[in-house]
Amino acid sequence: MVHAAIILAGVVAVVFAGLMATQRSLYACSVCLLAVLLQTAAIFYFLGAPLVAFLQVMIYAGAVMVLVVVTIMAAPAENPQALRKPSMPWFLAVLGILAPLGEAAWALSRGGLPQAAGWGASAAQMQVGTVLFGPYAVATEAVGFLIFLSALAVVDLNRSQL
Amino acid sequence: MNQAVWAVCFALFAVGLSLLILRRELLVMLLGLELMVNAANIGVVYGASLTGDAAGLSAALLIIAVAAAEAVIGLSLILRVYQSGRSPESDVLRELRG
């Protein structure tokens, strides 16, 4: 069952990734990417790494997609006539909504992580904190510094607007 | 199962690469780049799940953080292009000012 869930999430992710390539609207493209990111988080969860799945949803599907939407809002206005037509067939839009809901309902009905799959990720993620601030401490600090530098770069790039 | 996960990885990576190469809009190219990073991350997490390696999961978390920082910088640059009134297409932005 877990294998089927992973394959389903993978197929839905590939379908929406293919839709991304065919969309002319920036907004539709970003919505398709959001569907891919949610299915990727589902794959992480079913592989027994709920921490990575949670951070994928929070950082990628949350923060990064909000920034993308804000950038699209600043983009030149699209043709209003073109926006009246739906950008994808209705059944694919329904699939994009039902797939993560169905996966979440299935995961909740199972009552927890797919332990029976025999993968070791669920035990390994207990040691993630120890690894991040042990052998990988320099890399962790470097990434934190990189995020700080990216925030400074954003402020500097938009300094004339402030 | 192994082939299915790797097939998903390569398919997502290929679609992201095609978006990066074939589309001219800067924002769509950036979304393709994010797709490629996600595809690589699936491979990293799958490898970590097979071996039970905490270092693999840690690397996946660091990849997510680095990709978020890169997206922030890229989106800020694209926003500046929009605000300057220039065309947000890669074949138009060929010369540096100065």
Image (cartoon, coloured by chain):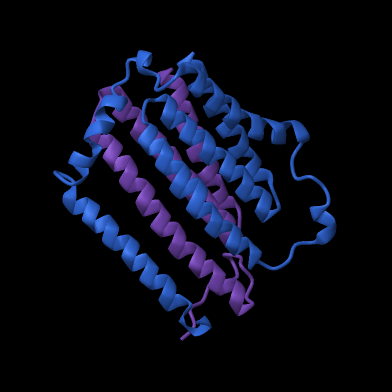
Chain colours: A blue, B purple
Q: Position of residue B16 (x, y in %)?
A: 52, 44
Residue drawn at x 44%, y 49% as measured from the top left: A59
Position of A129 with respect to B70 (left or right) is left
Residue drawn at x 43%, y 29% as measured from the top left: A45
Quadrant of the rendering where the N terminus of chain B is positioned: top left
Position of A83 with respect to A114 (left or right) is right
Residue drawn at x 60%, y 70% as measured from the top left: B92
Q: Closer to the camera, B76 or A108?
A: A108
Position of A77 with respect to A122 (left or right) is right
Q: Position of residue B86 (x, y in %)?
A: 62, 75
Q: Position of residue A43 (x, y in %)?
A: 46, 29
Q: Is residue A1 above or below residue A153?
A: above
Q: Closer to the camera, B95 or B39?
A: B39
Q: Closer to the camera, A92 or B81?
A: A92
Q: Position of residue A118 (x, y in %)?
A: 32, 15
Position of A111 with respect to A9 (left or right) is left
Whether residue B10 can be seen here: no
Q: Is residue B14 above or below residue A145?
A: above
Q: Quadrant of residue A128?
A: top left
| Figure disc tally | 0
Residue drawn at x 46%, y 81% as measured from the top left: A159
Whether residue B94 can be seen here: yes
Q: Given the current orientation, which residue lies at the most extreme left position?
A: A135
